[in-house]
Amino acid sequence: MSDVEIFNVPVSKGPLHFIASVPGSKSITNRALLIAALAQGRSILKNVLFSDDSWHFMDSLKKLGFQIQICENDNTVTVDGQSGKIPFPEGEINVGSAGTAARFLTALLALSTGRYVVQASTQMMARPMKPLLDPLTNLGVQFEFLQKQDYLPYIEQCKGLRGGSIRMDASQSSQFLSALLLVGCYGTGDLEITLEGALAARPYIEMTIRMMHDFGVQVQVPQENFQRFIVPYAQRYQGMDYTIEPDASNASYFWAMAVLTGGSVLLKGIRMNSLQGDIGFLNVLRRLGSQIEERENGIWLEGPKSGTFPGIDIDLGGMPDQTMTLAALAPFATSPTHIRNVSLIKYHESNRIAAIINELARLGIASEETSTGILIYPGTPKPAAVETYQDHRMAMAFSLIGLRVPGIQIKNPDCTAKTFKGFFQCFQETVETGNQNDNTIKHNLKGRIYEL
């Protein structure tokens, strides 16, 4: 669907019953790319996500001199690790709009003894970097800002990463903490990190620590409240074959399609014990009346009968990317929906709190910002063209509303290429297939027959 300026959302004619699969996880892909580049030996990464974000990440690694072999046909990337070294002592990279790449690669460069220019898109230039730049400065890195103080783009002058004890703020994004944890073992001594304030999206830190462990590096977490972390130095990642899970964040849109239409879906390849915190969104959908089972090759969900479900009061602090998905369901609930502890999404690809409120108002739905989140009232959405703010999750989530409301359009649908190229083609095909209400598909889903 390249170069399409508007996506006309197809209306579902009834319950959707379908089987779906989604690409690999963005969060796991980018962590795996960084770890593989740092590792000793070769890593073969399977089920890699190929999206705008991961392409920027891989392109940046190549420009730094890393040897990467890409086979997009089978979603595989082979990385020859450099044992914590940056091959080129100077260079210029562009992280695009990829927040993960911006934070992780900035930390990676700190290991070098070189000088690098880090460029970014206009969107990424507006996103915060200071909570990472301050601790890196304390660890010996120098930054020269090319436009605005504490924001991209900048020149990063590095003399190797010192060990030591630092304090940092990870309340706006867990990516700042993940970035330092991932590179910490390559410093000159143990790296001890103490958080100031709350930790945003703790499940992403748990993912980081579990992946580090998979590749052979241990993190010590002395306190149960996840406020202090120690990365002992002289540990080294070991290259390995590593399979990346399907993206649970993107799976949520297909589970939500079944919820809204009273249908059912088997999402292939994903497991309940996923590394990804967003797998917890299934518990939210269960509270809305969905039935959920883990099956032989995926997770099956049957939505509430006739797509009727209550509003809920829920803390999504551990899975803030699901705020937009729940916000798209909320107008159809039988009572208000209150989403709490998601203030950090103001600093994501867009100010997502403001974007949600603006676009719900455009659709005739009342909502309001609360102290830590958003309160959404049920109503009857009206046809409108939804602004997406160059934000892939706004585009994907608000398309759900069009399943039950004729005349919903999504502007700039290609912004979904950030994490899910071809999303709207999949969406269209899912509705067309599911609208057939094919008895074979419905029987296979309920009868636990997995391949059609």
Image (tube, rainbow, N blue to C red):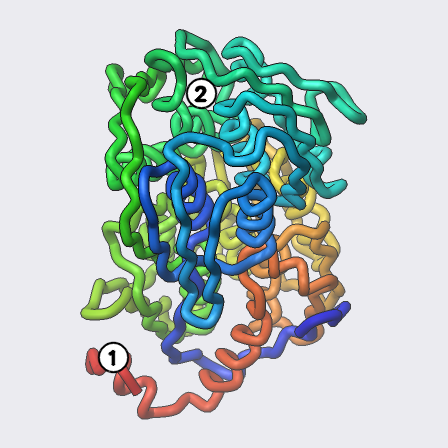
Instruction: Provide residue 88's location: percent of width, then percent of height.
Output: 57, 34
Q: Which residue is mark 2?
A: 198
Q: Residue 156 falls in which quadrant of the image?
A: top right
Q: Which residue is mark 1?
A: 450
* Mark 2 vs mark 1: in front: 1
Residue that appears at 62% across and 34% down: 347
Q: How many marks?
A: 2
Instruction: Provide residue 155's location: percent of width, then percent of height.
Output: 69, 25
Residue that appears at 72% across and 60% down: 386
Instruction: Provide residue 192's location: percent of width, then percent of height.
Output: 36, 13
Would residue 314 be seen by someone viewing this image from the given angle?
Answer: no
Badge 1 amino acid:
Tyr
Residue 153 circle label: none
Q: Quadrant of the N terminus?
A: bottom right
Pick the front one: 286 or 73: 73
Of label 2 and label 1, which has the lower sequence position? 2
Labels 2 & 1 near each other (Cβ < 8 A): no
Relative vertical location of residue 338 with respect to residue 26 in this rendering, above or below? above
Residue that appears at 40% across and 73% down: 20
Q: Secondary structure at mark 1?
A: loop
Q: Is residue 7 left or right of residue 141?
A: right
**Residue lying farthest to the right in this orientation:** 147
Say few, some or many: other residues with alpha carbon within 10 Å of mark 2 (under 14 / 14 to 19 / 20 or more).
some
Instruction: Provide residue 410's location: percent of width, then percent of height.
Output: 69, 65
Q: Secondary structure at mark 2?
A: loop
Q: CA distance from mark 2 to mark 1?
A: 43 Å
Badge 2 amino acid:
Ala
Would residue 25 be seen by someone viewing this image from the given angle?
Answer: yes
Q: Quadrant of the C terminus?
A: bottom left
Relative vertical location of residue 90 with respect to residue 132 in this rendering, above or below? below
Q: Is residue 237 left or right of residue 247?
A: left
Residue that appears at 46% across and 65% down: 71
